[in-house]
Amino acid sequence: MNILTNGNFLAILGASVAALAGIGSAIGVGIAGSAASGVVAEDPKKFGSTLILQALPGTQGIYGLLIAFIILNKIGLLGGSMAELSAAQGGYFLAASLPIGIVGIISAIHQGKVAASGIMLVGKRPEEIAKAMVYAAMVETYAVLALLISFLMINGIAI
Amino acid sequence: MNKISIIGLNDIKTELVKEIMDLGVVEISSQDSKLTDPEWINYVKKDGNENEVLNLDMKISNLNEVLTSLEKYDTRKRPLFSTRKAISSDEFDEAVLNNNSHVNENVSTVLELNKSFRELCSEENKLEAVILSLKPWVKYTIPLNMTETKYTSIFIGAIPSIADIEKLKAEMSQEIGKFYMNLIESDKDQFYFSFICLKDEKEDVYDLLKKYGFSPILFKDIEGTAAENILKYENYLKDISVKKEEIENKLTELVIFKEEIQLFYDHIIIERDKNKILNNLLKTDTTFYIEGWIPEAKKESVKVVLDEYQCWYDIKQPEEGEEFPVLMKNNSFVQPFESITELYSLPSPSNIDPTIFMTPFYILFFGLMLADVGYGAIMSILCFLVLKKYKPEGGLQKLLKVFFYCGISTAFWGLMFGSVLGDAIQAAAKLLFNSDFIIKPLWLNPMEDPMTLLIFSFVFGVIHLFTGMAVNAYMLVRDGKKLDAVFDIGFWYGFIIGIALWLFGNIIIPGSNLVGKWMTIVFAIGLVLTQGRAKTNVASKLISGVLSLYGITGYLSDILSYSRLLALGLATGVVSSVVSILGSMGGRNVLGILLFAVAMAVGHSFNFAINALGAFVHAARLQYVEFFGKFYEGGGEAFNPLVKNTKYYKIIKEDF
C-alpha cells in the first residue's frame, strides 16, 4: 500500500512537522546565547538578565512540541491503540501542523536575532531589560498566532 | 509637583542642605541655564566644591575595594536577599564619630594588605614563568652562566622540531672539525640542544645552525645549573604562598570590622552627595540660591524647616508647558505596579499616570496566561514569605508584590479551568490507585472548549482597549477638546460595537445584527465626515475621512493580539500533561513512582519558569503596545529628591 495514502502515517508526519519548530528555537537560542556570552565576558553579573532574553526564542520549540503532542494524543498513539485514520483525516493533521511548523522555525530565528540585540542593549543599559524583552515578544506574537491556529484546526478535526 | 525657590545666608547652607536631605522630599535641580542668563549672571556664581567631591569619591572607591576584598573572606552565611539594616540617625552619627579613627586604620591596613598581596601574586607569576623556561634544561649539567672556557664557546638553544637533525649533524661534522652537540630535551615544538665548539669557529657554527632555524637561548642573571635554579625558585614560591596565606589570615581576621566599614561607607556616600548637590546651587558673597521641585503634599514639612532657618522661599505651581519631574502617586495596592509602568517610561508631565488603569488588566492577563492553582499558590506564598522575612526594599519589593497579586489571579483562573499543577493529581491518582478521578473546572476546560475561551479573550481585549480609549477621551475633555473626544473616541466605540453586533450579535440576542448593521453604517459616515476635519479643502477632508476607516485594521489586529491569552494558557496546560504522560510511563512499581516524582519535579519547575516568564512578558506587551498605544505618552523624568542614598544601613529619623 502506498504510504502516502496511509492516514496514520500522514498524521504522524504532521506531528513531526510541528516538532520541527524546534529547529528555529535551536538556532534562535544559539544566536542569542553567543551574544550573551560576549556580554557576560565583560560583566559576569549580567548572567541572569541575559539568560532570560536567551530563553525567549526557545518557546517556539515548546509550541511545536505542544502541537505534536496534541496530534499524537488525539490519534491515540500515546495511549497505545492508534485509531485507524483515513487518508483525508491524516492529511488534515498534516495540514494543521504546517502553521506552527513553518512560522515556528522562521519566527524563532528572527526572535533570536532580536533577543541577541536585546542582550547587547542590556550590556550597555541593564535597566532597559524590559524593553528588550518586549521587542523579542513582538516577534513571538506570530508564533503564538500560528500555535493558536494549528491548535484550533486540530481541535476541529473529527476522528 | 510644585516648584520651590529658596534664598538663605551662606552660614546656614550646610545645615540646611543636611535638613533637606533628612526630609528627602526636595529635588534640587541644576541651575546652569541661569549662569548664561543676563538677568542673573551679574549677581550669582556657581556654587560647588569639586575638590571635596573628588576626594570623597576616591575614599568611596577605596572603601569599595576594602569591602569587596573583605567580602571574599567572610565565611558567614549570607542571606538570600541582602537588605539594609535599620538604624536610628543618632546611633548612626554616634557610630561614625566613635569608629572614625579605627575604621580609617583598618581601611588602610586592608589596602596595604591588598597591595602586598597583589605584589606577591605578580612575583609568583614571574617566578613561574622563569621556572617554565628553565624546565627544558633540567638535564643540562653545565652552569647556565658558563658561556666559554679558554678555547671553547658554550651555548644552548632551540631548533624547531620540523628541522632534519640527522642532516644537520652530518653537515656539522663535514664542515666543522671539532664540536660537541647534545640533545638535552625535546617537546612537540622544539629540540633543545647544547653546543661546545672552538671559539674561532663559533661564527661558522652559528651560520650553519641558523639555516636549520636555530635560536640561541640566554639566561641573564642566572648562576648555576637549571636544576639548581628551579629548586631555588620553587623554594621562593613556597615562601610566597606562605606569605599569601598569612595575608589572607590577616584579612579574615579583619572581617569582623566589615559592618563598621560599611557604616562608614554609607557615611561617606552621604557626605559626597551633600557636597555634590552644591554644584546645583548658585551663590553670591553672602547668600545662596536653591531651586527645585517638591511634591505638593510634602510642602508643609519643608516650610517648617525653612522658617526655622529664616530663609526666603517661594513655592508655586509650574508654569504652563514647563517640564517638571514626575512622581507617581497611587494607593498601596496599585503602587507595586508602578514598576511595570516605569519599565516602559514614566508619564510625561502633561500625561496621566496609567498605572491604576493598567493594574487590574495586568493581574487578569497574567493569571489567564499562567492559569494554574499550584503555580499561582507557590508563587504567591513564596513572594509573601520573602516579603515578610527579608523585607526587601525598592524595585525588588515592588516586583515581589506584583508577583504576589499575579499569583492569586493565576490560582483563581487555575480553579476556573480546573488546572492544579496541570493534571498532576489526576495522573498521580491514575498511577497509584488506577482511579479516574478528575478535577472539575468551575467554568470550562480550555483544552476541550477553546473557542469559548478565544471569544472571551477577545472580549477581555475589547474591554481593555475601550478602557484605554476612555482614558484618552477623559484627557481630551480635561484639555477642553470635548468634540475631539466625541469624534475620535465616541464614533470609534460605536463603529466597533456596531461591527461586532452585525457579525456576531445574532448568537447572543437574535435580531441584534440589524441594529449592528445600522450602527456600523451611521458611525462609519460619522467617521468619514469628522476624521478629515484638520484639512482645509472639502476634497481632502473627505479623502482623509474615508481613509480613516482603514484604521479598523489597526483595531482588528489589536483585538486579535489578545488571542495570546488563550494560546499561552493552553501552553501551560499542555506542557503539564506532557510531563504527566512522560512521568507515568514507568508504570505502577517503585521505579515507576520514582520516575514520576522526578519527572514532576523537573518538568513542572521548567514549565513554571518558562510560562511565568512568558506570562510576565506578554502581559506587559499587551499593556505597552495595545493599551498604552491608545492614550499613553511616556518620556517623563523621574522625581529624584536629595536623599540619603545609602547601601548598607537604612537611617531612620526618629520623631520628636
Image (cartoon, rainbow, N blue to C red):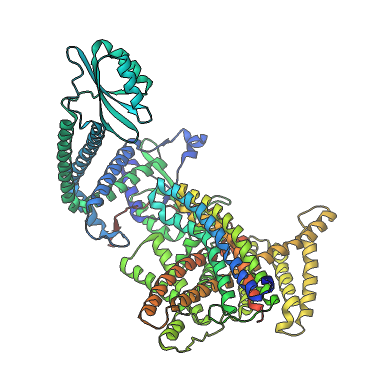
Quarter where residue B226 is shown: top left
Q: Is residue B19 left or right of residue A88?
A: left
Which residue appears at 51% of the width and 56% of the height?
A29
- In this rendering, the answer to whether B448 lies above or below B335 is below
Which residue appears at 69% of the width and 66% of the height?
B556
Q: Position of residue B450 (x, y in %)?
A: 61, 78
Is A13 in front, or is B413? Answer: A13
Which residue appears at 66% of the width and 78% of the height?
A156
Q: Residue furthest right?
A: B539
Q: Position of residue B476 (x, y in %)?
A: 65, 62
Q: Is residue B356 left or right of residue B54?
A: right
Is B431 in front, or is B307? Answer: B431
Kindly tell me whether residue B210 is visible in this rendering. yes
Quadrant location of the N terminus of chain A?
bottom right
Q: Position of residue B584 (x, y in %)?
A: 44, 79
- In this rendering, the answer to whether B472 lies above or below B376 is above
Quadrant location of the C terminus of chain A?
bottom right
